[in-house]
Amino acid sequence: MKNLTEIILTIIVMCYSTILIAQGTPGLEFTPHPDNPSELQVARGSASFNVQHIIIPDTFEGKPVTRIRALGFRFSSVMTNITLPKSLTSIGSHAFNGCTGLRSITLPNGLIYIEISAFEGCTGLTSIAIPNSVTVIRGSVFAGCTSLHSITFPNSLIHIGSEAFRGCTSLRRIELPNSLLRIDSNAFQDCTGLTNITLPNNLIEIGLWAFSGCTGLTSFTIPSSITRIGSNPFRGCINITNITVQAENTFYRVEGNSLIRNRDNTLISGFSNSVIPNTVTTVGSSAFSGQTRLTSIAIPNSVTRIESSAFRGCRGLLNIMIPISVNIIQWEAFHSCTSLTIYAEAPSQPPGWNWDWNPHNRPVVWGHVSNDDVVASVYVSSLLGNYPNPFNPETTIQFSIGDVGNVMINVYNVRGQRVRTLVNEQKEPGHHSVVWNGRDDGRMVSGGVYFYKMTTGEYQSVRRMVLMK
């Protein structure tokens, strides 16, 4: 049964256009182009749903075919490939939406516009080459193309729209052209197979949740050209351990390897291994959203605001410490934190804490944040990482301690030989750091890969760092 949109479009065509049925290509219907009557558009291909290979001619009755109308081939499950006319300049919205049998399509070099959701849900499409005549990939164009593993982007591309590649789970590596200026919200959401992406040096904007749910990403470099990052572009990227912002960027900074803050000292994005430094004044909207491996965190007394959904979906979060300096907590800051206990330094709820800041009524311990037992329960032993990495001449290694006890941190070379012992002493619970200056017990070491190992009573962890020379 046709949906309402198809019925309306059919009525419009019947009322205002003369349908021309191609003799050599059964089932294709043509109407005059809405903006140029001297050109034609493929109005409908539904009668060809039982044809595997469809060929659209370059011209029909002496007029060039320049457009595929919206919904033209929607939900064709039998069609496996289609030959598009060389004269084609635009593909309408949802034109091939849900064509699950489509395996192959070649986009002509003169193509200019691909409208929203044009290929959404084409689950059999494995590769696509976008011609250089295309400058914008609009919203949801390839969303849900779960078999798409290869994309060739044009050198003219300047803009990738919202949810353009959402759910393309077979993508592994993406090379974006230097012409690209903007990536919109959720553009690569839930591309769970994506392990590597290099952002171009001219990129200006990354939209909110642009890489949300890309669980295959482990590291990310943000170019110095970036002037705007939307709310937590890495929401739910639970395996990211290292974020780098190129040093000359004046808008954003990295803290402790995996925290991004802007020049207004608002925390944009954080991860499960993060310790918030006292340079941060605001924990931004959705900053830790979806970080299911985050178990505990302490808010420093430099913070005055925790914004909406800041810790949304942190189901593993057990404890959080909120100092009295925090006078604003916005709605649903701790939404779906099902195991959380909140320790607040304030003796009762401050007036600036939104009525829905704790929507699931997680237990709150008022006025006890300075209690030693509570402090100890909030921290866990963890080797958090080093920054900068790569580095020259020195780097800061960050770690946290859950219980009083001896802590050892050693540096090793690639042969497993100990280079230097940085820490070997008893530490109190809390966040700590130590600087390695690139020396062994006397001299500077050569450039290359080194490893640092942290050992406590029952905890061991090893991380990698690179000394550049």
Image: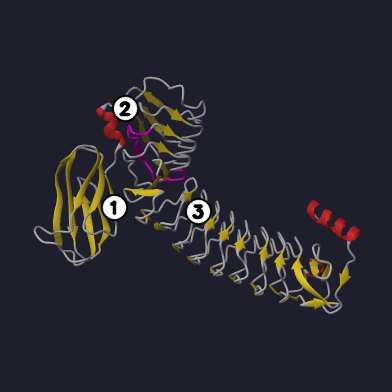
Colour option used? secondary structure
For disc 3, the marked residue is: 205
For disc 2, the marked residue is: 369
- Earlier in the chain: of badge 1 and badge 2, it is 2
Q: Position of residue 200 (x, y in %)?
A: 46, 63
Which residue: 42% across, 35% down? 339
Secondary structure under tag 1 reads: strand
> What's the residue type where badge 2 is placed?
Val
Q: Is residue 360 left or right of residue 436?
A: right
Foreground tag (1 vs 2): 1
Crowding near pointer 1: few (<14 within 10 Å), some, many (20+)?
A: many
Q: Position of residue 409 (x, y in %)?
A: 18, 51
Secondary structure under tag 3 reads: strand
Q: CA distance from mark 1 to mark 2?
A: 29 Å
For disc 1, the marked residue is: 387
Q: Is residue 37 left or right of residue 198?
A: right
> What's the residue type where badge 3 is placed?
Glu
Q: Is residue 394 left or right of residue 231?
A: left
Residue 420 in view here: yes
Q: Quadrant of residue 113?
A: bottom right
In the image, the segment drawn in magenta is 288-303
Residue placed most toward the observer, 373 or 328: 328
Foreground tag (3 vs 2): 3
Assess whether residue 294 is covered by the magenta stretch. yes
Q: Are marks 1 and 2 in contact (CB under 8 Å)?
A: no
Screen quadrant of the N terminus: bottom right
> What's the residue type where badge 1 is placed?
Tyr
Which residue: 34% across, 33% down? 302
- Magenta span: chief secondary structure: loop
Which mark is on residue 324?
none
